[in-house]
Image: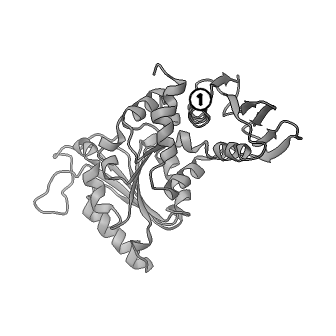
């Protein structure tokens, strides 16, 4: 069910949601959080698709703010509003999605125009689920300082995705400079499986010390640098980053020790097949598929507490592999 609400106000949206809940005999109290999405019209539907899928694991109210491209209506062009003393256009179009179109919750899409574009907090506050944590997500372009952003300031967790921004390294530089315990970037979340596998490999005998490490993958690939920074910080050994032409994701990690090289290789991200090579043992083939954005978002919605390891990597480990940044 999709309901369009042109030229509306937040109180009307709230009233409509209450009516729909009453018609369906349900309550919003089952929502575990409110997910705020700050995006543009080009990315809106894809972002909502990801949020819709993630909400099946985390029932939530999704509020997407996407500034409208429509021109601002002047008083002469505007239709009279519901209130007798309010004759100007509200400069807010909205859409409410329920049922199959909204996953395990409801989706509210806000299209502000004019001055309302600069006040997203006043638009979303009346629509938040009471007593539920707020998560802010920027699917592509993120503010330089998410904690000072009007939406980010009210969030318990702030999720960015520097890799999908127009300039990943500049975005990460901004995020590092304005780091906050509540911030996390999905460039890091993409590495969860790699980090888990490497930790498991190092937890096996003979427990020999690592003398150096090498990470391979695409040129200027942000997750690869984060993985190298993590290894440099945790192993306290030199780590080199090697570009692999044509690669689309991390292709391998090689850890040198006295008995040889311990490695985890995944030449093709599409096939998702990795090989663990341990000195003195036969290679072992395992499945390490590329993580989807839906999986990354679900993981971050599952863990709303600060990611201490990520904090260490971007505040300490990054400087060890990029000393001049």
Q: Which of 123 and 86 is in front in this view?
A: 123
Q: Mark 1 points at which residue?
A: 221
Q: In this view, does 7 lie to the left or right of 235?
A: left
Q: Residue at x 48, y 39 (%)?
A: 312
Q: Which residue is drawn at 64% across and 24% down?
A: 241
Q: Can residue 215 be seen in this view?
A: no
Of all residues, the one furthest to the left in this rendering is: 85
The spot of residue 180 in percent (x, y) is 38, 42
The mark total stands at: 1
Q: How crowded is mark 1: few (under 14 residues within 10 Å), some or many (20 or more)?
A: some
Of all residues, the one furthest to the top in this rendering is: 324
Q: In which quarter of the image is residue 144?
A: top left
Q: In which quarter of the image is residue 187?
A: top right
Q: Is residue 2 above or below residue 170?
A: below
Dot 1 lies on which element?
Answer: loop
Q: Quadrant of residue 221?
A: top right
Q: Nearer the viewer, residue 271 or 6?
A: 271
The spot of residue 267 in percent (x, y) is 76, 33
Quadrant showing the C terminus? top left
Q: Is residue 19 above or below residue 75?
A: below
Q: Which residue is drawn at 47% across and 33% down?
A: 316
The spot of residue 310 in percent (x, y) is 50, 42
Q: Which of 26 and 247 is in front in this view?
A: 247
Q: Is residue 300 left or right of residue 127?
A: right
Q: Which residue is drawn at 36% across and 53% down?
A: 155
Q: Can residue 142 be seen in this view?
A: yes
- What colour scheme does the image use? one colour
């Amino acid at each position: 069910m999709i309901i369009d609400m042109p030229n509306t106000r937040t109180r009307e949206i709230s009233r409509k949601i209450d009516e729909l809940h009453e018609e369906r005999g349900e309550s919003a109290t089952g929502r575990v959080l409110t997910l705020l999405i700050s995006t543009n019209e080009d990315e809106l539907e894809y972002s909502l698709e990801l949020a819709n899928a993630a909400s099946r694991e985390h029932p939530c109210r999704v509020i997407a703010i996407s500034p409208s491209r429509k021109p601002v209506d002047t008083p002469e062009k505007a239709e009279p509003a519901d209130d007798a003393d309010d004759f100007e256009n509200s400069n807010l179009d909205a859409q409410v999605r329920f049922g199959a179109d909204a996953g395990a919750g409801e989706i509210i899409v806000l299209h502000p125009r004019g001055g309302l574009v600069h006040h997203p907090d006043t638009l979303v506050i009346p629509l938040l689920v009471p007593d539920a944590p707020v998560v802010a997500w920027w699917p592509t372009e993120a503010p330089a300082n998410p904690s000072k952003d009007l939406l980010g300031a009210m969030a318990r967790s702030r999720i960015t995705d520097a890799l999908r921004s127009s300039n990943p390294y500049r975005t990460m530089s901004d995020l590092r400079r304005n780091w906050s315990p509540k911030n996390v970037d999905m460039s890091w979340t993409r590495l969860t499986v790699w980090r888990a596998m490497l930790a498991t490999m190092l937890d096996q005998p003979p427990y020999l010390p690592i003398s150096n490490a090498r990470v391979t993958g695409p040129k200027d690939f942000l997750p690869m640098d984060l993985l190298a920074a993590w290894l440099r910080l945790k192993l306290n050994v030199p780590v080199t980053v090697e570009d692999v032409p044509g690669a689309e994701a991390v292709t391998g990690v090689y850890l040198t020790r006295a008995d040889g090289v311990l490695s985890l290789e995944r030449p093709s991200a599409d096939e998702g097949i990795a090989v663990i090579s341990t000195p003195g043992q036969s290679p072992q083939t395992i499945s390490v598929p590329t993580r989807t954005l839906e999986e990354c978002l679900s993981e971050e919605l599952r863990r709303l507490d600060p990611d201490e390891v990520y904090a260490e990597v971007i505040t300490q480990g990054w400087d060890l592999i990029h000393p001049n940044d």
